[in-house]
Amino acid sequence: MNLAEALLGVTRLFLDTAPVIYYVERNPQYFPRVSPVFDRIDNGALTGVISPITLAECLVAPYRLGQAGLQQDFFDLIVHGAHTVFFSLDQENARRAAELRARHNLTLSDALQVAVALMAGCQAFLTNDNDLKRVPDLRIVVLDELTN
């Protein structure tokens, strides 16, 4: 399936950590796959939804390596990016995450990510984690499964 097919009818897309890292760090293998997604977000064709978990995960390596510029690049995209929504966690997200974790045997961070995506009204979830395909309530788009 190509990207256009995978995102058919999608107006709100949850962005998992890996695609954001691939884009910001211009990963040579994945940048060509994620760049069109971020182009759609930039031009307003898609709204990107991102959680504090994605922000925290994206900042770990730049903090370890003392890369202040990269820290700021992630922060700017995730918190202040055009056509992106930074969706905070609350008690309802926690309840929903616990339910998802119990039903689908997800890690806590994955369950929280999926809970945010569902509560934010996302039609799809962009990731590179096949384990998330256990969740039938949301269209999971795995980068490694996309064709050019």
Image (cartoon, rainbow, N blue to C red):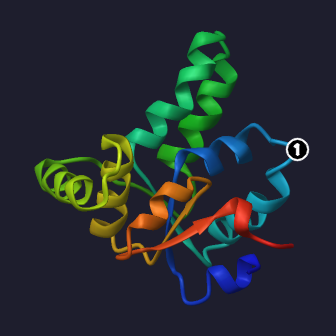
Task: Name above or below for residue 35 compared with residue 106.
Answer: below
Task: Name above or below for residue 24 compared with residue 113.
Answer: above
Q: Quadrant of residue 73?
A: top right
Could you tell me which secondary element the residue under label 1 belongs to?
A: loop
Q: Residue at x 60, y 26 (%)?
A: 71
Q: Quadrant of residue 85?
A: bottom left
Q: Quadrant of the N terminus?
A: bottom right
Image coordinates of residue 96 in percent, x first then y, are 18, 59
Q: Residue at x 76, y 79 (%)?
A: 2
Image coordinates of residue 105 in percent, x first then y, are 31, 53
Q: Quadrant of the C terminus?
A: bottom right
**Relative depth, front residue between 13 and 70:** 13
Q: Residue at x 79, y 51 (%)?
A: 30
Q: Quadrant of residue 123?
A: bottom left
Badge 1: few (under 14), some or many (20 or more) residues near its Cα, within 10 Å?
few
Q: Is residue 60 left or right of residue 34?
A: left
**Relative depth, front residue between 29 and 58:** 29
Q: Is residue 51 left or right of residue 1?
A: left
The number of numbered badges drawn on the structure is 1
Image coordinates of residue 124 in percent, x first then y, are 49, 73
**Relative depth, front residue between 63 and 81:** 63
Image coordinates of residue 135 in percent, x first then y, are 38, 68
Q: Residue at x 47, y 37 (%)?
A: 55
Q: Residue furthest bottom?
A: 9
Task: Name above or below for residue 54 compared with residue 140.
Answer: above
Q: Which residue in the structure is indicated by mark 1?
A: 28
**What amino acid is at disc 1?**
Pro
